[in-house]
Amino acid sequence: MTLLRVDASIQGDRSASSALADLVLDDFVAARPEVPVVRRHLGQDPLPAHAWQAAVTGGFIPESDRTETQHEALELAGRLADELRSAKSALFALPLYNFGVSQHVKTWIDLSLAGAAPGTRLLEGKPVVLVTTRGGAYGPGTPREGWDHSTDYLRRILVDIWGADLTVVEREFTLVGVNPALDEFTETAALMRKNAEEAAAQAGAALADRHAALLHPERG
Ligand SMILES: Cc1cc2nc3c(=O)[nH]c(=O)nc-3n(C[C@H](O)[C@H](O)[C@H](O)COP(=O)(O)O)c2cc1C
């Protein structure tokens, strides 16, 4: 009956994505204080990158032939898949780094895929909020339109592969005020931040409602 929260910032207390996810969680917890929150932080406690290869190759051979490394990797992969499967709802704070998802997020997804039978819909019908932040801006007409290779990839995995009922909360231009080259976008960035924070609060309240509706469908 848990809410699963997964963060991936590598920037510790300065994380914009975690701050935005905190707003989602605040409204969720205010409405559903009884729901246990399970947390995983991929940026602070990265999963071992070598485990994916060991889990995949271990899965191709009989259990008795597996090496210790393959056993451990498959156990980890199974645990990650179970974490997704056993959550009733989820909140993911996964920022854009180097125009894509971080290696930490990719490892988490690859291992979770290896930990379940092919095609398993680990988040089928579950309400999921994806919070994502980007230092620049990638909207239509911007010089780097199409360079965000993270958000669409995450939609493919969360929605099309795992079946999530997804809401995306995005904040762009988080590097305005940090990188002087972006100073001309100060007003735009402030508006984007305000809109993102409002969207986060709304998403948290909606997530709480949808979590409750899954637990108590009779209350409609
Ligand atoms: C190593 C690194 C790579 C980054 N790469 C990009 C990038 O490719 N495009 C971009 O718009 N911002 C990039 N950024 C800025 C982040 O997207 C921005 O700081 C965002 O807020 C990160 O989320 P966080 O604050 O939760 O860590 C990068 C930041 C770091 C530290």
Image (cartoon, helix red, strand yellow):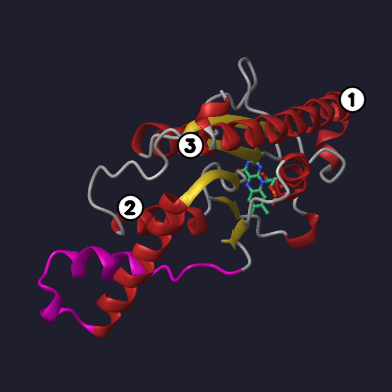
Q: Is residue 172 visible?
A: no
Residue 132, quarter of picture: top right
The Cα atoms of the two marked residues, 3 and 1, are separated by: 36 Å
Residue 199 placement (x, y as % from top left): 74, 28
Above or below, 65 against 53 in this view is: below
Callout 3: 10 Å neighbours few (<14), some, many (20+)?
Answer: many
Identity of the amino acid at label 2? Leu
The boundaries of the magenta stretch are 45-67
Identity of the amino acid at label 1? Glu
Residue 130, quarter of picture: top right
- In the picture, the quarter occupied by the C terminus is top right
Does the stretch in magenta take in 50? yes
Residue 149 placement (x, y as % from top left): 49, 36
Residue 85 placement (x, y as % from top left): 41, 50
Q: Residue furthest front?
A: 218
Numbered mark located on residue 187 in the image: 1
Dot 3 or dot 1, earlier in sequence: 3
Above or below, 41 against 85 in this view is: below
The Cα atoms of the two marked residues, 3 and 2, are separated by: 17 Å
Q: Nearer the viewer, residue 180 or 18?
A: 18
Q: Residue at x 29, y 54 (%)?
A: 116
Identity of the amino acid at label 3? Lys
Residue that carries the numbered disc 2 in the rendered image: 113
The Cα atoms of the two marked residues, 1 and 2, are separated by: 41 Å
Dot 1 or dot 2, earlier in sequence: 2
